[in-house]
Amino acid sequence: MKEGNNKNNNNNKLKFSPYWVYAVIITILLGMSMFGGDGSWQSISKTNISDFERYLNEGDVEQVIVVNQKLAKVTLNSYGLEKSVHKSIKSKNILGQENTGGPHYEFEVGNLELFQRKLEQAEDKGIQFRYEFMTVENRWMDVILGFLPIIIIIGVWIFLMRRMSGGGAGGPGGQIFNIGKSKAKLFDQNTEVKTTFKDVAGLEGAKEEIQEIVDFLKNPKKYTVLGGKIPKGALLVGSPGTGKTLLAKAVAGEAKVPFFSLSGSDFVEMFVGVGASRVRDLFKQAKDKSPAIIFIDEIDAIGRARGKNNFTGSNDERENTLNQLLTEMDGFGTDTNVIVLAATNRSDVLDKALMRAGRFDRQIYVDLPDLNERREIFKVHLKPLKSVKSLDVEFLSKQTPGFSGADIANVCNEAALIAARKNRKSVGKQDFLDAVDRIVGGLEKKNKIVTPEEKKTIAFHEAGHATVSWLLEHAAPLVKVTIVPRGQSLGAAWYLPEERMIVRTEQMLDEMCAALGGRAAEKIMFNKISTGALSDLEKVTRQARAMVSIYGLNDTLGNITYYDSTGQMENSFTKPYSEKTAQVIDKEISDIIERQYKRACDLLKKNKNKLMQLAERLLEKEVIFKDDLFNILGERPYDVKPDKKEDGKDGVKVAVN
Ligand code: ADP
Ligand code: ZN
């Protein structure tokens, strides 16, 4: 989600557009074909061959011209013009002027020979008139028709070019001639968007670091006087939606300098050399406006490590672009006062050359917000909403662990929409909770067709998750279990996980056991298992693999990790371990999972009664909360202080299926 961008662009004066040219050409073509090629601007009365014979015999006609052997144009003589039958033709002219010069009538001659004979007969009778045969070519039409195929081909070509270059991102641009121009959006004093640090909630650490950059831009002298060099770039690293763009914009807003914003993928085009030329153009523009900030979002699109696993050679263009970027960053002196900010969520895959001193030598981490930061972000985004006075922001931030700033902005907006749909006067707590559910789980699908049989399976599956996690010490406590289909899932158990930094082996094992509780319940109740546990299995397998091969939590393998933080092994065909170790890893992973599955089965067998009660309650009510669990399952065996849990652990996480 990006902030609203410069609205000014839209209400510019009538812009010159290539479409005007097309319009003018078409008008000219139409005009020419309408008025024919003879340049006659008179409008001529229609008549027919028998009337014409009468006029001819009465001696009204001065001249007949047969054009292209088809059309006869008749001019009357002064005697004829006096007659009342011809009165109507006199003021026949586009401008309303009298048509004295003629031609006055026209008609289709039909059979030419017959017509010619009639004219000769009249001549023989001694009637005074002239006649003439004439061929008129509409030259323009012929020329244009001749060129038409070429015109069409050129038209199609231009159209394709425009499409490929993204359809006019800048000014009249986007055309083939502008393809090498940078597509950066410029925000400066003239644009209305004024983002400041006030709009960025939380992120105190990042803000502090970035404050320095604002200082550099505001008074560069202060730093250069002592011989220091102003950094040229900073890299903002963090998951999507954590406010990196927002932060960069705030820097520009605080320092009051122009801000060029574009995405790494904007450089990438199917033509060779375009990316590099766009980089050049971008830096040139920025230098002209310095002091300025260039912000490149998703820099990993061009900044990935070069020359590795490049089997196809298809990445040459990206490399050229990256090289150009490096050259430009080296090229401008510290006195240029252009600072490049770039954002990525994968700093590990970036080319090391980007991180070298004098380039993006600063890295600023922008993490997902914690509880307090989420509260601050909620406050920012609640401001424009009409929410009920008693709204508990603290509670909302507890319900949204793992949400990014963008997610929270989304929750607020969604809640307002939900409230509006229900015709409420203000946005209430339930609307926010519905919005959270919807964002985590997708839209409720009340009318999704589920057979009673399936419903029963789902109920037992979810009840299995609920029972197992209730009975395990380290599994996250449940808040709600539902069998209402939502998004892709058919049912869900919602947990309140702790936000913890490190996870111990027991905690991981308990979580895996709870995740397998669904399938275990199906097995115990129906002695059948179903495909419904796919996402559970996926999660468990990933976790087990991580335990063994990443975190070194497995006794057989010991303190070893095969994780590669540089991301260089990602596309490699070789594994960092031997074939024999691979077999051990596979065996350990499967052992861990089977052990936990068995544990879940045993737990459920012991508590089969409770499991059945819970499933029945679920079938009856579709959604059940902690109170029901409490009534059926009793006190959680490991909850030391049930009320402490409410504060210490926060938020809801959903386990689907
Ligand atoms: P990123 O660039 O990291 O993907 P953005 O900066 O585009 O994320 O953030 C998207 C939106 O999320 C912002 O426009 C803003 O509305 C909201 N947002 C994200 N982080 C914050 C924050 N810390 N404070 C306030 N709003 C935030
Ligand atoms: Zn499940």
Image: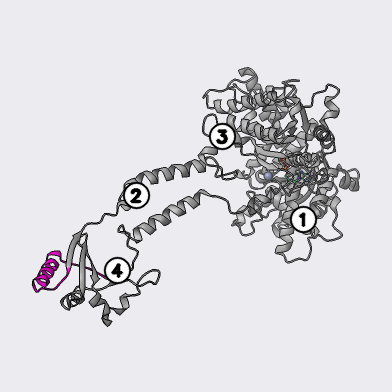
Is the C-beta separation of discs 3 and 4 under 8 Å? no
Which residue is tagged 1? 432
* Amino acid type of the residue tagged 1 in the rendering: Phe
Q: Which of marks 4 and 1 is in front?
A: 4
Q: Percent x, y for residue 519?
A: 67, 43
Which residue is tagged 2? 144
Q: Nearer the viewer, mark 4 or mark 2?
A: 4
Q: Can see residue 198?
A: yes
Nearest to N terminus: mark 4 or mark 2: 4
Q: Percent x, y for residue 170?
A: 60, 43
Q: Nearer the viewer, mark 2 or mark 3?
A: 2
Q: Residue at x 78, y 60 (%)?
A: 427
Report the side of 555 relative to 140 (left or right): right
User: How many marks are shown on the rendered structure?
Assistant: 4
Nearest to N terminus: mark 3 or mark 4: 4
Which residue is tagged 3? 180
Label 4 crowd (10 A; few <14 / some 14-19 / many >=20): few
Rounded to the nearest whole Å, what is the CA distance between mark 4 and mark 2? Answer: 31 Å
Does the magenta portion include 522? no
**Along the viewing direction, whichever of 585 and 59 lies nearer the viewer:** 59
Q: Percent x, y for residue 61?
A: 20, 73
Nearest to N terminus: mark 2 or mark 3: 2
* Amino acid type of the residue tagged 4 in the rendering: Gly
Is 406 rendered above or below residue 284? below
Nearest to N terminus: mark 2 or mark 1: 2
Is the C-beta separation of discs 2 and 1 under 8 Å? no
Label 3 crowd (10 A; few <14 / some 14-19 / many >=20): many
